[in-house]
Amino acid sequence: MDSVPEEVSNSSSGGGEGGAENTNTHENRSQQRQLPIRPPIQPASEKYSPLNWSAYFDQEDDVSIPESDDIFHVYTAGKEGPVVFCLHGGGYSGLSFALAAKTIKQEARIVAMDLRGHGKSSTENELDLSIETLCGDVLAVLKTMYGNSPPAIVLVGHSMGGSVAVHVAAKKVLPSLAGLIVVDVVEGTAMASLMHMQKILSNRMQYFPTIEKAIEWSVKGGTLRNVESARISIPSTVKYDDSKKCYVHRANLMETEQYWRGWYEGLSEKFLSSPVPKILLLAGTDRLDRALTIGQMQGKFQMVLVRHTGHAIQEDVPDEFATIVLNFISRNRIGPNGVEIPGLRRPMKSQQ
């Protein structure tokens, strides 16, 4: 039988009001039985401990670009379907898409690369984050991975990576491009925020005694809202500085200010000019500029407002994000070789 608190036991052995007190004792016992068992408090060091990418992606690889010293790190998963090629935002890494990859890989292939100056990628000039250089990097990785016969590609880009995805699509040099998904970046809002960016970067925490503290800061500071995703992605966004004897941010964004305007200027028109199905995911109520507003009214792209999430939609609500991506692929009939039209057979490739 459940033990009864001492004060209830003592009062129930009293005099004339014993019947009512016994009733109260019975109610207290019932309430004790109904209370859910509180889980043990998890130490902060365990709650924010790093998680390995291998539970989400199938493998990681280094893609060496011919005739250069540039090596780009990629995470891949899935064996069939089109390739969902993911580009992360400034200061993030390819592991920003890890949780979503676990779902996407069930119906498509997914590749998430570490952009120049980020994650495990290594390049000759880590600070050259000009839009032309970033676009060239993406096209070089695709060329190196797939040669002259790439599978159907659905470009997915978050924030800065969204800008890169749009610029790559607008170049119209990727014949197998089958779709474009841009995550939480709108030209007008992005351009307006540039004047505050240096202050935002300088005010964030710069030094971390441990990786666990970096993960904890990202969650408590509001950068990410999903602890599991933070435990996977944040370790790849910091590096150990021997001179300072602590961890610092891997990407030196404060030194790349000269390129920021180029990421977002003219983004709306380039997005609309891309000749493939496209979708814009927004985490808030960003006001569309005139070009996007008209484009949406004309049905040139789909817009989805994802609620209860921060800037990193793919990390904060990965299941919802993955569902949107897979529904986009299904709705537009994007197969491993491009748009599949029912009843139309593709010619067999000749055997070499």
Image: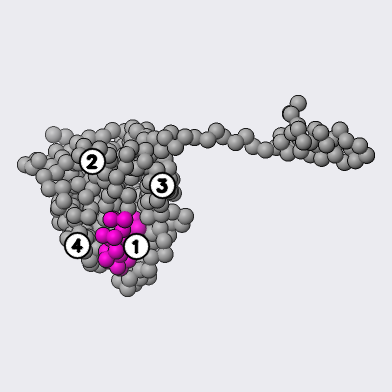
Image mark count: 4
Extent of the magenta region:
182-203
User: Tag 2, which secondary structure?
Assistant: loop
* Residue at 41%, 61% in the rendered image: 284
Residue most extreme to the left: 67
Residue type beneath disc 4: Gly
Query: In the rendered view, would you say 195 is above or below 65?
Result: below
Q: CA distance from mark 2 to mark 1?
A: 48 Å
Q: Which residue is mark 4?
A: 262
Pointer 4 with pointer 2, Cβ within 8 A: no
Residue type beneath disc 1: Phe
Q: Which residue is mark 1?
A: 301
Q: Which residue is mark 2?
A: 244
> Which mark identifies residue 219?
3
Which callout, 4 or 1, points to the residue nearer the camera?
Answer: 4
Residue type beneath disc 2: Lys
Q: Main secondary structure of the magenta part?
A: helix
* Residue at 33%, 37% in the rendered image: 210
Pointer 3 with pointer 2, Cβ within 8 A: no
- The picture quadrant where one finds residue 76 is top left
The front one of 66 and 16 is 16
Rendering coords of residue 126 (x, y %): 16, 47
Which quarter of the figure is the C terminus placed in?
A: top left
Residue type beneath disc 3: Val
Rendering coords of residue 22 (x, y %): 85, 36
* Residue at 32%, 42% in the rendered image: 208
Labels 1 and 3: the sequence-earlier one: 3
Query: In the rendered view, would you say 29 is above or below 204?
Result: above
Which quarter of the figure is the N terminus placed in?
A: top right
